[in-house]
Amino acid sequence: MGQLLIRRLIQMLLIMLVVSALLFAIFDSDQFRRKVAVAELGGLGLATLSADDYHAWLDRRGLNQPFFVRYVAWLDQLGHGDFGQSIEKDVAVSTLLGESLSNTAVLAFFVFLIMVPVSLTLGVLAGMQEGSALDRIISFLAVFTTSIPQIATAALLTVILALGLGWVPTKSAMDDGWSFRALVLPLLTLLIYDIGYLVRMTRASMTEVMASHYIRTAVLKGLPYHRVILRHALRNALIVPVTLIFLELNGVLSQVVVVEVFFQYRGFGRMLFDAANFGDIQVLQAGTLVAVCVAVASQGLSDVAYGLINPRVRVA
Amino acid sequence: MSIAHPLLPGLCEQLERGVMSRREFIRCATLIGMTARTAHAMAGSTAPAMAAETLPFPAVDPGAKHGGILRIGQMVGKMHDPATYSWNEMSNQTRPILEYLTMIGPDNVVRPMLVDWWQPSADLRTWTLHVRSGVKWHNGDELTAEHVAWNIRRWTDPALGSSNLGLSTFAALTEFTGGRDAKGKAVRRALKNGVEVLDSHTVRLNLARPTLSVAEDCAEYCTLIVHPSFVAPLSHQPMGTGPYTLADLRVGERCILKRVTHTTDGREFRYWGGDVYLDEIHFYNYEQEYQTAALASGSVDAIYELTIEQLELAQSIPGAQILSVESAQTLCCRMQVDVKPFDDVRVRRAVVKAADNARIKDLVFGAHGSVAHNYHVAPIHPEYFPLPPPVRDVAGAKQLLKEAGYEKGLDLTICVGNNDGPWQQAVCEALRDQVKDAGINLKVEVLPATKYWEVWNQVPFGATSWAHRPLGTMALAQAYRTGASWNETHFSDPKFDLALSEAEATLDVAERRLKMQKVEQLLEDAAIVLQAFWRPVFSLASSRVRGYRPHPARQIQLTKVWMT
């Protein structure tokens, strides 16, 4: 187990190094520098600068150095625990990152709190008897909800719940402080898709288990049906969904870009989107590091969980 | 405190002879430093109610209530360096904290603000500005001429990258070094003795050429006056002369302003401009297309701007106040004269001839706004000389194309960034349909707004939005004079430059208007811009807000706004 974690950790650091170097390289272009200059000075301000003054301005902003110099400087700064400064928002990246991550964590917490029990229950119910009426209804709903893109769900929910019924606000910026009502729309948008997906996976896993020989044997032995399901089928059927749930951590982190931007919720996805639009390189770098970290960590957790649940796998 | 100007008797005489209308007289008299009320008195009319003669603010209902929080929906930007602000919204957030030397009212007339009077020399090359006495900074310091000079000198530093250097006044405080940069652009430096401090409250500007628009230029959106101790970002140490200070700023979220009651050294702070009503001003981040809905749902009390697309929605909000004002805000579909095929004037004329400006305006703005005639001077400008309106002439356009060698048609691409709203794209699309009749295949390339600002002065054919300027000569000097910073068409005509300089050196409006005929005609003949209309500016506020007025340059002025 320890070895696996160390391997994962090294893997994560390597990915981080490569991805961040790539980002710096991508943003090392005249076009990018011009974009930052326009954002900072405006097209009209920039037009007043001569070529020399423009380069002097870039020098003052540290944008003129070759990318590896900036990269090494950034690594050094990171080594001292400093994520740098957001040029778009004039605040420390760590402040921005802390706020946006905690907002997304709140959203993700509710997503998992609701998604896990609901979809495991529905998936198991559907998979218990393949082809039954219950299976058909649940499967149809699951396919239906996963086939609508989240952006469409978001628009539809806004029209019905916010504009039509007026139950919730259209925007989740929470200008007047935290409110659960404002969280409803982004939460539902994420849930509708994610529940459908997890239900389908759980159902597939469950039907496979139910068709296996040992379940047939258990049934033929005359064991009560609920005992067969609870004691024999569930443990094996849940191996796949549980590993998927951990991987879903990473999935949610990428889905929030669409949902948070649409509802203007101040989370991690919105922060990344703004930073990418503006060319706010330090924010983008920090965000990428976090994303890589979550991706690798969720895979690691998923591996560990798989090892713990699946008797056929013993992690050394 | 106003000093009779040598040009004043001439103005009075013109008024008596009827050569000059009352409105023009007032406009011109305030330009040479007379207070609006005195000017109105001389013109024999009643001045619009003002809070006090020496103050730039409108009068307030005696029953106006103190207190309350005004919530405004607009994009919330960072407040880094007021001299290099890239959006108007940033100025809106800052205007209650920092102030201008002068202020343009919603009626497009300039008024004294941090300077209480000014006086140009007869040749308009030397301007004396008198700094208002008794204006205090938030740290208790008194505003002095040194502070003002420090700001103006800063703007004239060509390395700062401030859009102020594109304004005639501050450009006239620089000179060409004779050198050229890598791209062939002439290099400038600040004039040695351009800004002189005469005494504790008097500044003199020694300009390189006659400049008409000093008072107006001092009210542009990047000319907010900072304390000489200023270090960017402003949001970290927001010190100004205005009645408010920054309590909280979250870019893309909100900007909270609170009243200043005490100076930083603990004394009582008295605002020079008299009573101020609102306790707090909150800006909440709403993109343009959501602002009206935010007001409808009660999330905000007023919005930055009501767009034409949202007008109908706004009209359905009970009690909402919709006001509009004429402006010189416009879209210039401009062609670069040194890029093929636009280097041939016949091609440019063909594009202009094939278009029907009035039809484009009707399609996009309906009954609102007014038709423009391709020379970038608006009817609301005091020196507007109405030329005969152009007539659409498709046959003529075809003939011109034939002469230019494009008998079989011509493929063109226009870039548009919708910087001022999606209506810009609609203008280009209408143009596309019209010029088709003359055999021009126009492709409309839509760029994201920020992307357009990266290429606005580089694309051969582009639709650039031009903000309102209070004087007609201002935009011309900024956009069409040889070598001007914002000369996006690369137009260079010594005859035009000379004619414009002559108009700019003429304080007398009637005379200047006559001189503008030549200027406008030269620009129209050059056919470098297709400019269909002047768009109006709409404002929207809930029924509780009082004194919230639309401004032609979209400046939100909140000093005397109050809430019921």
Image (spheres, coloured by chain):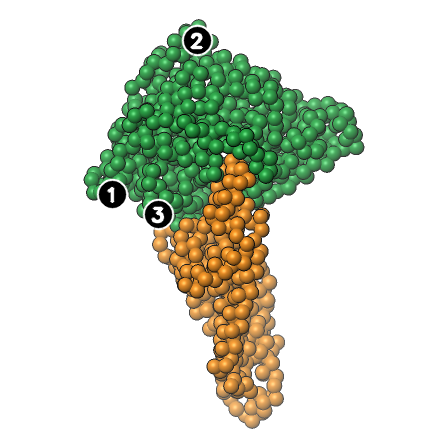
Chain colours: A orange, B green
Residue placed under numbered mark 1 in the picture: B264
Residue B321, image x and y in percent?
Answer: 40, 34
Q: Which mark is residue B403?
A: none
Q: Residue at x 60, y 21 (%)?
A: B494
Q: Chain of mark 1?
A: B
Q: Residue at x 40, y 12 (%)?
A: B7
Inspect the image, locate mark 2, and give the three-letter code of the amino acid beneath it.
Gln
Residue at the right extreme of this rendering: B408
CA gap, disc 3 to disc 1?
14 Å
Element at badge 1?
Answer: loop
Position of the N terminus of chain B, as image quadrant, is top left
Inspect the image, locate mark 3, and give the three-letter code of the amino acid beneath it.
His
Q: Looking at this view, is A234 or A276 the one in front? A: A276
Residue placed under numbered mark 2 in the picture: B14
Residue placed under numbered mark 3 in the picture: B236
A51 vs B196: above or below: below
